[in-house]
Image (cartoon, rainbow, N blue to C red):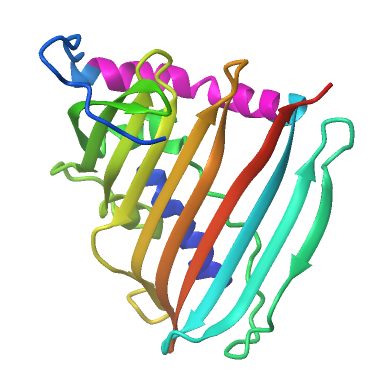
């Protein structure tokens, strides 16, 4: 289970408020998609600093819920963890952890389900694996964003590792803030199933991933909502996993 979960998390490497179209006759011309990707790559280099600044200067509550279901759809485990980030206190403070014992497996499930949302835009080798189409302009959170659709390129790339096979089967959309070219939201999906070690160790049947970000008054971006759904098999055990992670009560530390 731990191996399959870790491998499944790399699927998002193929990616990264109401909405309304802003492509009327008076709208500014759309930039070339090549320009959009170039500026997004430049912005991606600043994301690590952005994240450090957010954690160092804002108080917020982080809640994460993982639910595990067997092949019949019955809940076998539910893990809820809530913590508060307080810049004045190193690492924040865990407030609550609730879990239902997994009755179908004795394997320890990895708690590390962090998904690297910036990897695609920060790595030109990954970018070359995809084709991009600029679909238009939308308003997201009151700010104009450019909507880019991506899918695997027809070019031949190495597919010897599980990660590389995942990248060859990931498609989705990403919204980029038109002023700052930061990722506002993204959604990615596995277009078809992938076996682990030829399907003998396990298989990922389905994987969907989404996240939404917000911008603080000071211009710092953070992930407000992250969700993913995984349908998988480990040897002979079929199960699904759903994850929901939120950041709420975001405020500037005094």
Residue 92: horizontal and vertical position, in percent? 83, 43
Residue 166: horizontal and vertical position, in percent? 33, 56
* Tally of numbered tags: 0
Q: Quadrant of residue 185?
A: top left
> Residue, x 33% and y 36% (percent of image)?
174
Residue 207: horizontal and vertical position, in percent? 37, 62
Which residue is nearer to you in this view: 238 or 134?
A: 134
Which residue is nearer to you in this view: 164 or 37?
A: 37
> Does residue 25 show up magenta in the picture?
no
> Does residue 41 show up magenta in the picture?
yes
Q: Is residue 80 above or below residue 188?
A: below
Q: Quadrant of residue 144?
A: top left
Query: Can you say which quadrant of the picture contains the N terminus?
Result: bottom right
Which residue is nearer to you in this view: 145 or 70?
A: 145
> Residue, x 63% and y 43% (percent of image)?
247
> Residue, x 35% and y 17% (percent of image)?
178
Residue 176: tell me if it is visible. Answer: yes
Residue that protrudes farthest toward the left in the picture = 25
Residue 16: tell me if it is visible. Answer: no
Query: Can you say which quadrant of the picture contains the C terminus?
Result: top right
Which residue is nearer to you in this view: 21 or 62?
A: 21
Q: Is residue 80 above or below residue 221?
A: below
Q: Quadrant of residue 15?
A: top left
Residue that protrudes farthest toward the right in the picture = 89
* Chief SS of the magenta region: helix
> Residue, x 31% and y 55% (percent of image)?
189
Residue 139: horizontal and vertical position, in percent? 32, 26
Q: Is residue 45 left or right of residue 197?
A: right
Which stretch appears magenta? 35-54
């Amino acid at each position: 289970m731990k191996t399959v979960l870790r491998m499944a998390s790399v699927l998002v490497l193929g990616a990264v408020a109401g909405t309304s179209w802003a492509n009327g006759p008076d709208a500014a011309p759309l930039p070339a998609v090549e320009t959009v990707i170039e500026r997004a790559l430049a912005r991606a280099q600043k994301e690590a600093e952005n994240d450090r600044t957010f954690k160092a200067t804002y108080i917020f509550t982080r809640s994460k819920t993982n639910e595990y279901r067997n092949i019949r759809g019955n809940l076998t485990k539910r893990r809820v963890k809530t913590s508060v980030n307080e810049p004045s206190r190193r690492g924040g403070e865990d407030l609550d952890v609730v879990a239902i014992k997994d009755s179908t497996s004795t394997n320890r499930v990895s708690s590390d389900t962090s998904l690297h949302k910036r990897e695609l835009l920060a790595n030109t080798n990954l970018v070359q694996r995809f084709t991009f189409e600029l679909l238009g302009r939308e308003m997201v959170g009151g700010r104009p964003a450019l909507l880019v659709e991506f899918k695997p390129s027809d070019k031949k790339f190495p597919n010897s590792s599980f990660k590389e096979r995942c990248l060859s089967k990931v498609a989705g959309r990403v919204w980029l803030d038109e002023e700052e070219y930061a990722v506002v939201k993204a959604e990615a999906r596995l277009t078809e199933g992938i076996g682990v070690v030829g399907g003998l160790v396990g298989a990922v049947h389905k994987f969907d991933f989404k996240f939404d970000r917000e911008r603080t008054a000071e211009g710092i971006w953070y992930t407000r909502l992250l969700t993913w759904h995984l349908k998988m098999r480990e040897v002979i055990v079929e199960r699904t996993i759903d994850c929901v992670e939120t950041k709420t009560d975001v405020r500037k530390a005094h």
